[in-house]
Image (spheres, rainbow, N blue to C red):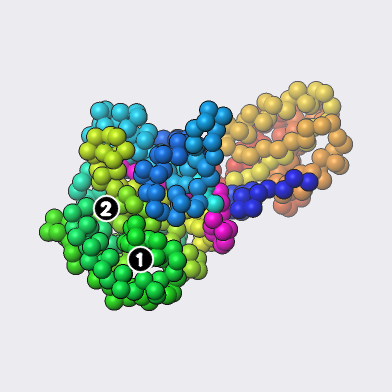
Amino acid sequence: MIKRLRGFRDITGEEAQKFRIIEEVSRKYLELLGYSEVRIPILEKTELFVRSIGDSTDIVRKEMFTFIDASGDSVSLRPEATAGMVRAYIEGNFYAKERITKVFTIGSMFRHERPQKGRFREFNQLDVEVFGSYGPLIDAELIWLITLILGELKIKDFRIEINTLGCSVCREKYKKLFSEFVNERLTCLCEDCKERAKKNPLRIFDCKKPECHSATQDAPLLFESLCEECMAHFGKFKELLAGFGIQTIHNNRLVRGLDYYTRTVFEVTSERLGAQKAFIAGGRYDNLVREMGGPNIPGIGFALGLERLSLILETYPKKEVPKVFIAYLGEEAKKRLFGIVKQLLDKNIPVYYELDDRSLKSQMRYANSLSVDYVVIIGEEEVKNGVVILRDMKNGTQNTYGIDFTQALAEILKSFPMR
C-alpha cells in the first residue's frame, strides 16, 4: 500500500466541515467589505520567494520545496501567498485599473519543516491583501475584519498583539544599535541566531529558544528609534482600533519572520495552541511592490491558518436540514426518481438513493446507515396508484402522498421551519 508523505494528510470528517465553515464565514465578511477572490498558482519561480521573503530567512534557506523543472528553471511550491499575490497584482496591472485593490485567496502552502500540532508540510491559509493605501485606517480595518470573522465563529480565547517595525530609515538606524548589542552576546545565542546576527539581526527577536529570548531581554527596542512619521502612524492606528472597540496588546518584541514587513505588524494568538500559538499574522509591506518590479505602491495583509483555527473552533453553526433517501423498486419507479430528486434539490434538501438495483430491505439498511430523516418509497404499486410513501425515520411513522410529491415535500419542510 502506498501511504501519504510525512507532513501531508487527508482532511476529512469534522475537520473538513470546520474548514468549510471558516471559509464560508470569511467569504461573507470579505465580500461585504469589498474584497474579491484571486486564485494564484501553487508553483512559482524560486526567485519570486527569494526576492520577496528574503534569502536570509529560514523559509528560503531551509523550508521551501524547490526543484529544477524540465525546462531547467528553478521552481518552488509556494511557502506563503503574499509574494504570489504581489506578482499577480503587478502582472495583471491592477494598479492601472483601480486606486485601491482588496483581494483574497484560499489554498495550500508548503514548507519542509518538522510536523507538529497544527503545523504540517502542506497547510491551508486564507490570505487577505490590500494595495494602494499608506494610511493606518486600512491597518485597523483588517484587524476589525479578523474580529468579525472570529466573533461569528465564537472564538473567544484569543489576543491581538501589535507592533511597528518603522520605515527603512528608522529601522536601519535601529539595526546598527541592535547589532552592537547582539555582538556583545553572541556566545549566548543559538547557532541559527548567530547567523541571523550577520545577515538580519532583527530576526533574533523571532527566535523561540529560551537562551535567545533571555539574551535579548534587555535589548534596546526598535520602538524607541522610530521617526516622528512612523510614531504618528502607529499612534493613529491604535486610536482607530479603539474607535472600532478592539482591544490589543503592544508587544514590542514582535517582528514577524519575513523580510518585507514595514511599520504595522500583528499576530492573533491563543494559549490553547501551545508553543506555536499564532494562528493569524500579518502586517505592512510598503516597499515590496516596488522591489518586485512594480510601481511604488504600498500593501498590507494577513494570513489565517485553517488548521490552527480549526483546533480551537469548538462550536460552529450546523445547518438544520433534513436528509432524504429515495428507495425505488422497478424500472417505472426508477423513471420517476429524478423528478423527485429535482424537487428536493430545488428546496436545498440533501438527497440520497441507491445506485444499483437492490431489494427494499437492502435499501432501508443503507438509508439507516446514512442517518437520514425521511425515506421516500416508490415501487410498482405506488406508480400504478399514483402515490409515494413517506416514512419518518425518527418516529417510524409513514404516510401516503400524491406522486407529484408536493404534499410530501410540505411535510418534510414542516419539520425543519428554519429552511
At label 2, counting other C-alpha atoms closer than 10 Å, the crowd grade (few under 14, some 14-19, many 20 or more) is many
Please state which amino acid type lies under the numbered disc 2. Thr
Bounds of the magenta segment: 113-131
Give left or right: position of 216 versus 21.
left
Residue 77, relative to residue 341: is it above or below? below
SS label for mark 1: helix
Q: Is residue 89 magenta?
A: no
Q: Amino acid at mark 1?
A: Phe
**x then y, percent, for residue 35:** 35, 39
Q: Quadrant of residue 267?
A: bottom left
To which residue does mark 1 refer? Answer: 205
Residue displayed at 61% across by 39% down: 349
Q: Judge left or right: residue 104 versus residue 326.
A: left
Q: Which residue is disc 2 drawn over?
A: 262
Q: Pick the residue in front: 363 or 105.
A: 105
Name the residue located 18 percent from the left edge and 58 percent from the top edge: 170
Hey, which residue is sitting farthest left in the picture? 228
Residue 277 rendering spot, x and y as whole percentages? 46, 65
In space, the residues marked 1 and 2 are separated at their CA atoms by 15 Å
Residue 233 shows up from this direction: no
Circle 2 sits in a helix, a strand or a loop, which is it? strand
Q: Quadrant of residue 384?
A: top right
**Residue 337 shows in the view:** yes
